[in-house]
Image (cartoon, rainbow, N blue to C red):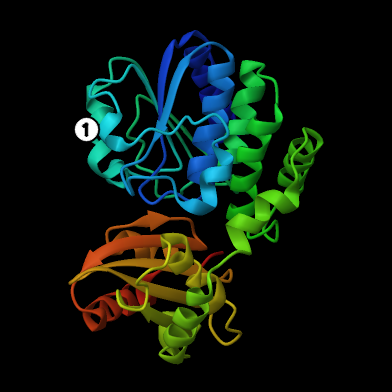
Amino acid sequence: MSDMVDQGLKAAAKVLADARDVTLFGHLNPDADAFGSAVGLGLALRDRGATVRVSFGSPNEVPESLRHLDSAGLYVPASEVPAVPETLVVLDSGSIDRLGPLADRVANATGQVIVIDHHVSNTRFGTLNVVDDRSEATAALVLRLLDELGAPLTEPVARALYAGLLTDTSSFRRATPATHQAAARLLAAGVDAQAVARPLMDTHSFGWLRMLATVLDRAELDPTAARGLGLVSAVVLARDAAGLRPEDVESVINIVRSTREAEVAAVLKQAGPDEWTGSLRAVGRLDVSAAAVALGGGGHRLAAGFTTHGTAAEVMARLRAALNAAPLIP
């Protein structure tokens, strides 16, 4: 796999070295790895003279916690993305449906469609796929790609990539020596680690505290679920999240997952009358990506997500069945 990834990075660098117009997508409701990877690569390509735009299917603006990463204003709303892009780069997206209303641009692109990702469930929907499920973050792959391009590591580029490394490694708690070395390079380029981390992880409104109290009061622990390894779960109703940022709601999983008695943590978030998005986390023994795929989603072995329909009780029942069928991690 390493040789295949290296070859993919070289091929992607060859395409991007000559590209004059590049559109970069992150997934729906982008996190710091998706948006930071797109912005970091976009900035480097812009500095090489290319016309660059960064976008995602929804929401229709950059989440507040991520805005400090887009120092050059590369973001454009989905409605302003060309219907027929030239070179297209899709980052941190395991499948084409993760692009939402922008999914048709993959078939419409007149040039290469480069997929750069680290999800084990990636479906390889590009014309050139650089997928390494051993990489802790897509941002780490982008850094390797920039090295192939010979692109300078400026502070704005490094800041965007650092955000991806920081969040997808749980503040470097799950990082390999190579990832720590990559982070050191980014810090040496001038990144202020505290300034990057605070809006991503340590800033919430007072309303977030009230929402958290309400949701955690309904949390449930089932020691027999998830193949007997334990499941802790919580449900965020639409009324609980009223007035809060999407990233505030998404952060609930980071609290729930700290439960000592459970291998798996799950948070269901109401997205519509009968629509739910789910976030799954595992400590290290159960492959939650398999459960997410069974519910129409995907992700990593220890962190995955899905979108599905039904009542909260129906979704939880399907999730429990999927977790009981999920494989153990060797």
Q: Decide: is 117 above or below 11.
A: below
On screen, residue 196 versus residue 42, left or right, reads right
**Residue count near mark 1 (Cα–Cα under 10 Å), binned few <14, some 14–19, many ≥20:** some
Quadrant placement of the N terminus = top right
Relative image position of residue 190 (x, y in whole percent): 78, 36
Q: Residue at x 43, y 45 (%)?
A: 62
Residue under numbered circle 1: 104
Q: Decide: is 323 above or below 160.
A: below
Relative image position of residue 53 (x, y in whole percent): 42, 26
Residue 176 visible to the viewer: no
Residue 116 visible to the viewer: yes
Relative image position of residue 242 (x, y in whole percent): 34, 72
Q: Nearer the viewer, residue 119 or 90?
A: 90
Q: Residue at x 40, y 49 (%)?
A: 121
Q: How many marks?
A: 1
Q: Decide: is 200 above or below 187.
A: below
Q: Nearer the viewer, residue 32 or 5?
A: 32
Relative image position of residue 182 (x, y in whole percent): 73, 39
On screen, residue 193 versus residue 26, left or right, reads right
